Structures are given as structure tokens and as C-alpha cells.
Image (tube, rainbow, N blue to C red):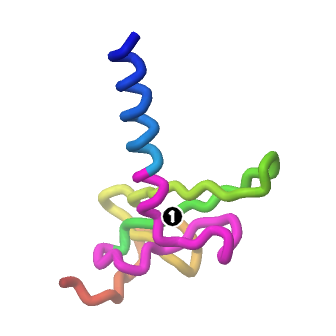
Amino acid sequence: MMKTTIGVVAILAFCFVWHAYATANCTATGPGRYVEPNDNTCKNYTLCVYITANNTYLAYNYVCPTTSLFNPNLARCTSNYTCTTNAG
């Protein structure tokens, strides 16, 4: 029983840290997909989901597949977007 409790606590802690990492302020932006401003690879984005049951947002971090980049104009991963950030 103790090992199960520790495992559940560890999973919950990981989920909290994962959600806290998202840089998009979903309350300010609303639902949708938003670029991670500190990402020099142009592959990372945050998905903001509105939860009507408790009037809150959940933020999920995603990474585009290897052959694509996150296009903030289309709010999705595409293969024809040119990353314009400065690496490093």
C-alpha cells in the first residue's frame, strides 16, 4: 500500500511540474495552440484547453514531429514554415 501511495504522489508531482512548465498564459490567451517564446527550435508549443466544468484552463506542452516546425500564423505544425528565431 505504501509503494502505491508513493507512486501516485510521484505521478501527480510530475504532472504538476509538466503543466507548470507551459509558458503560455491560457487565461490571457484563451483556448488554442501558442508558440513557446523561448524555444529556438520552433518546434515547441502549448495547447490551452478550456474546462467548462470548473471554468479553468489546462496547458499541455507539445513538440512538433521531426520534419515540421510550429507555425504560429496557422497555430499548427507544418513542413513549410521557416524558423526566424536566433539559435543560442
Q: Is 16 a magenta residue?
A: no
Residue at figure coordinates x 41%, y 52% from the top left? 17
Rendering coords of residue 77 (x, y %): 47, 65
Amino acid of disc 1: Thr
- Seen from the viewer's position, the closer of residues 19 and 30 is 19
How many other residues sit within 10 Å of disc 1, few (<14), some (14-19) or many (≥20)? many
Report the span colored magenta. Answer: 17-41
Quadrant in which the C terminus is drawn? bottom left
Rendering coords of residue 26 (x, y %): 63, 68
- Seen from the viewer's position, the closer of residues 25 and 76 is 25
Q: Seen in the image, is 74 located left or right of residue 9?
A: right
Residue at figure coordinates x 37%, y 82% from the top left? 82
Residue at figure coordinates x 32%, y 87% from the top left? 85
The extreme left residue here reads 88
Q: Which residue does the numbered mark 1 point to in the structure image? A: 46
- Seen from the viewer's position, the closer of residues 4 and 50 is 4
- Numbered disc total: 1
The extreme front residue here reads 2
Q: Seen in the image, is 25 located left or right of residue 43?
A: right
Residue 81 falls in image quadrant: bottom left
Rendering coords of residue 84 (x, y %): 35, 88
Q: Is residue 36 above or below residue 13?
A: below
Residue at figure coordinates x 69%, y 65% from the top left? 31
Q: Seen in the image, is 45 located left or right of residue 3?
A: right
Q: Is 20 a magenta residue?
A: yes
SS category of the residue bearing label 1: strand
Quadrant in which the N terminus is drawn? top left
Q: Is residue 13 above or below residue 66?
A: above
Residue 9 falls in image quadrant: top left
Residue 32 falls in image quadrant: bottom right
